[in-house]
Image (tube, helix red, strand yellow):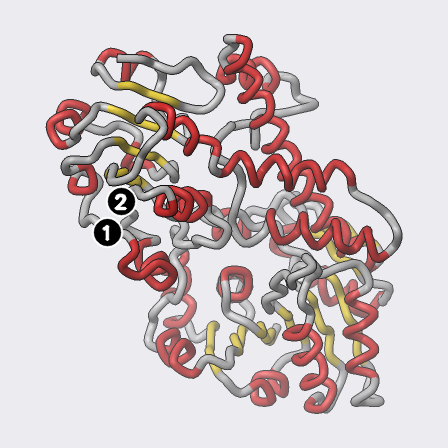
Amino acid sequence: MNITIVGTGYVGLVTGTTLAELGNSVYCVDIDEKKVEGMKNGIVPIYEPNLEEMFLRNIQAERLFFTTNLKEALDKSEVVYLALPTPPGEDGSADLSYVLQVANNIGEMMTEYKVIVNKSTVPVGTADRVSEVIASKTALPFDVVSNPEFLREGFAVEDSMNPARVVVGSSSEKAKEIMAKIYQPFTNTGIPIIFMDEKSSELTKYASNSFLAVKITFMNEIANYCEKVGADVDKVRLGMGSDDRIGHRFLFPGIGYGGSCFPKDVKALIKSGKEENFNFQILEATETVNTAQKVILVSDIENYFGGNIEGKTIAFWGLAFKANTDDIREASSLDNIDLLLKKGAKIVAYDAVAEKNVQKVLGDKIQYAKSMYEALENADALFIATEWPEFKNPNFKLMAEKMKNKVIFDGRNMYPLEIPEQNGFYYKSIGRKTIVK
């Protein structure tokens, strides 16, 4: 089948490459000429494990194409996926301007029946708005489908090729048949496709992400309480997660959630609720708790240094909001760096993947190291902000030689408590006892 993908961000590029891998001819459209030219030359514009190999394979197989010309791609395709940004506005609502503008363009350009598939995360009722915009521009038949993505950054290729389920919202039998055909390679292997109405499909995405944000935040609250009463959150987490009604995933405490999805989607669902005179009280509390959790270690750093960190050098391991991505949107590292800089600290950071994106935001406000150990040179303390695999088994002896003080503030609970203790480090993590050297 010939398919157009409009937008080549994380969702669009992974979706387009996956659909090409399933044997379709896929035309990826983006307005950024430089980006499109780079992709034509085999340059993947985002960091995502295992994406480059699949990307290059499908370009070589002539199943994956890139263009800035929407009309050209539209004329070749029966199905058009919208994978456009829906950033939060100042009031938290999702900005649909990109989605509705492309819908307007499709309405003006289409010459035959199309299925318009909304892959972007959008509020309930967006499929109706897209339909209205297209219908205002053409009398030709078309269908609008909601098909939310459930990709985890860092595991997007794996999730895209092996989804837990495929959700399709449509009231059109013709559109359902076309979507079933696209996803037949998945359903043939037992992956369920769940058909529902458009509004339920749109809400499924928001409800899923918001629930996971609540789960993470609840565990962070439990972790903070563990510190008060002397319990160990790692043991509590294992005990809870062994209940199959709860499960082990998203129970790892830390310095809050970030990224492009959870913060934005929680805000948007709260805003959508208010528009219907409905208050999502749990989600409002989740936002409040998460905001505080992201910088919860800063007060511990201040306390360790006697209430004054002016002139102290803090090494940062990790800048991305999570491992295996270069995404720094809503990253806890940035919140901590901003607060520490305001308090007079100096920051030396290392992140091999996300550094360039941080430089665009912070410039020379902080220093950047070429290696994890270089970042530690004469550091007063180490702050671990991202759980990159290379940080999991460091050379503690070398760390001690490099650092001015053997002090670690771990926002991701990277190490069993006995490891820093055996190496003579002061070690403060989340929800566990503090190791005092």
- Spatial CA span between label 1 and label 2: 8 Å
Quadrant containing the N terminus in the rendered view: bottom right
Q: Does residue 64 show up?
A: yes
Name the amino acid, label 1.
Gln
Image point (34%, 69%), residue name = 43
Could you say which is closer to the camera, residue 211 or residue 28?
211
Task: For marks 1 and 2, give the one nearer the viewer.
Answer: 2
As drawn, the label of residue 376 is none
- Residue 425: give x, y in percent of width and height: 25, 18
Residue 179 place in picture, x, y as percent: 71, 63
Q: Front-most of 183 and 281?
A: 281
**Disc 1 crowd, CA 10 A, few/some/many (<14, 14-19, 20+):** some
Secondary structure beneath label 1: strand
> Relative to residue 182, is residue 242 depicted above or below?
above
Looking at the image, which residue sits at the far left?
401
Q: List the single residue furthest toward the top.
A: 230
From the viewer's perspective, is residue 322 above or below residue 93? above
- Residue at position x 30%, y 42% in the image: 345
Dots 1 and 2: beta carbons under 8 Å?
Answer: yes
Asked whether residue 322 is in view, the answer is no
What amino acid type is highlighted by mark number 2? Lys
- Residue 390 location (% of width, % of height): 28, 37
For mark 2, what is the residue? 346
Local packing at callout 2 (Cα closer than 10 Å; few below 14, some 14-19, many 20+) is many
- Tell me where residue 400 sits by quadrant: top left
Image quarter hosting the C terminus? top left
Secondary structure category for the residue under label 2: strand
Query: In the image, which disc is placed on residue 367?
Result: 1
Which circle's residue, 1 or 2, is located before the other in the chain? 2
Q: Picture coordinates of residue 335 (x, y %)?
A: 45, 46
